[in-house]
Image (cartoon, rainbow, N blue to C red):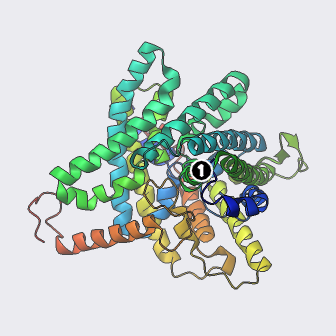
Amino acid sequence: MAATKTGAQASATSEQTSKQILLRGLLQENPALRQMLGLCPMLAVTTAVFNGLGMGLATTFVLVCSEVAVSLLRKAIPSTVRIPAYITIIASFVTLVMMVVEAYLPALNDALGIYLPLIVVNCIVLGRAEMFASKHGPAQAALDGLGMGVGFTLSLVLMSAIRELLGAGTLCGIQILPSFLEPMLIMVMPAGGFAVLGMLIAASVWFEHRKDGVAHGQEDRPSQSLCAACPLDCGLADPSDDDCARDALVDRLEAAVTKANLTGKDSGTSDKGGEA
Amino acid sequence: MAEYASILFSMILVNNFVLVKFLGICPFLGVSKKFDSAVGMGAAVTLVMVLAIAVTWPLQQLLDAWGLQYLQTIVFILVIATLVQLLEMAMKRFLPPLHASLGVFLPLITTNCAVLGVAILTIDEGYDYPQALVAGLGAGLGFLLAMVIFSGVRRTLEDAEPPEAFRGMPITLIAAAITAMSFMGFSGVIDHLFGA
C-alpha cells in the first residue's frame, strides 16, 4: 500500500537499493568520518575499545528504533512540529537504553556517564530521522539506521583502538605493547582525541582521493559539519549539497553581524533606537 | 564565595566544555571561522545555558519529588528546545538590537549538546541552585573563551597550506588538539588558587 505512486520504479530497483542503503553508511557516507556528524561522542568516549563499542551499539539501537518509529509515523506527524516530535521519539529510546545499561552494564554506565543521555542530541540520529526516515518506508529506514549505526560503531571502535593502544598500550584491556615502552598518555587525553580524529579523517580523505584519482579533491568538507544538530527546515537529503540552508544562514548571520558592527560601533546594546 | 569562584573557574579552564569535555563541538568547528560570529555564538550559548539551568534545576526537584527521574532526558530536551524558541521570539519582539547580534544564533543551538550537557551535569554533580547557576555561567564563558581563542587560531590557519588530504576539517582538528593541549596546563591551577 505504501508503494502506490512509485511502485514500479521502486520494485525494480529495491533489491539493489536496500543493499546500497545498508552499505552506504559503512564507508562512503560514514557518519563520523565522512559526514562529520556525532563528533562529540566520537571524541569523548573513545579512550578504550570497550567504551567505544558500547557507545556505538547504544547509538545503533537508538538509530534503528527511532528511524523505524519516525518512518511509521511520518504521515501522522504534521511537518510544522516534526522536529519536536522526532526529538521526543529519540529521547524515549535513549531513556530505554539508559535504563538497560544502568541495570546490566554498570561499568559501561560509569564510563559513558553524561554522554549516554546525550545520544538524544547526537546529530546523526536527528539527521537521519529528518533526512531519511521521514521520506522512506520502515524497512528501508531500519536498514539505513543499521548501516549508519554500524558505520558509526566501526569508526568509534577504530578510533578507540588507536587511542587505547597508543595511550595505554592495551587493547580491550589486554597488554599489547611491551611494558618497557612508555605509553603516550596524551593519546587518551582530550588533546589526543582531536589529533587522532583529525588524522583519521585525513586518512579517509586520502583513501578516497587515491580511489578516484584526486579529481574530486575540492569538496568543501567543513560545511558538512554544520548539518550537525541543525534544526533548520532545509529539506535536503545530502548535507554536502551546495544549497545547505544552514550554510546560507551562517553566511547571512556573519554578514549581519559585520554590518551591525560597522554601522553602529557605539550604539550597540545601550542605544535601543538603532539608526538604519 | 571561594566555593562559587572555584566552580566558575574550574568550569571555564579545567573542565572547559569544548576542549576538555567535547561538548558543543559542532558549533565550535562550524561557527568559529570569524571572530564576530564566534563571540556572538559564545554569548548566545552562555545566555541559554544559564536560562536552561534556571528552568531545569527546579524541574528536576519536581521530577525527584514525583519519582519520575527516568523522564529527565525527555523533559530536559523538550524544555530547552521550547525555551530557546521562546527566547528568540521574545528577543525579536522586545529587544531587536540584541536580536540582531545574539538572537540570530539561537536557532543553531536548539539541540546543542553543550546546553543539555550542562543541565544534566549540574544535576549529576548534586549542586544546589546558586551553584548550578554559577556552573552554567562558567560552562558558557568557557565555551565563549574557547570559541574566541580558536577563531584566532583559524585565522592563521587559513593562510597555511597543509597537504591535500589535511585541507579543511582534518587540519582544523589538529589545531584544536594543540589548543586543547594548552588548556591541559590549567589542571591543578584551581586547587592551588582556591584550596583543595
Q: In the rendered view, does B122 fall on the left or right side of A156?
A: left
Is residue B2 at all visible to an observer of this figure? Answer: no
Q: Nearer the viewer, residue A183 or B97?
A: B97
Q: Position of residue A64 (x, y in %)?
A: 67, 43
Residue A99 vs A165, above or below: the answer is above
Q: In the rendered view, does A262 fall on the left or right side of A224?
A: left
Residue A242 vs B194, above or below: the answer is below
Badge 1: how crowded within 10 Å, few (<14), some, or many (20+)? many
Instruction: Kindly state the secondary structure of the residue where label 1 is placed.
Output: helix
Q: Residue furthest left?
A: A273
Residue at image point 41% right, 48% down: B110
Tell me the quarter of the picture where residue A207 sits.
bottom right
Q: In the rendered view, does B24 fall on the left or right side of B94?
A: right
Tag 1 residue: A133
Q: Nearer the viewer, residue B130 or B57?
A: B57
Residue B78 vs A241, above or below: the answer is above
The kind of residue on which mark 1 rests is Ala
Residue at image point 68% right, 41% down: A55
Q: Position of residue B119 (x, y in %)?
A: 44, 35
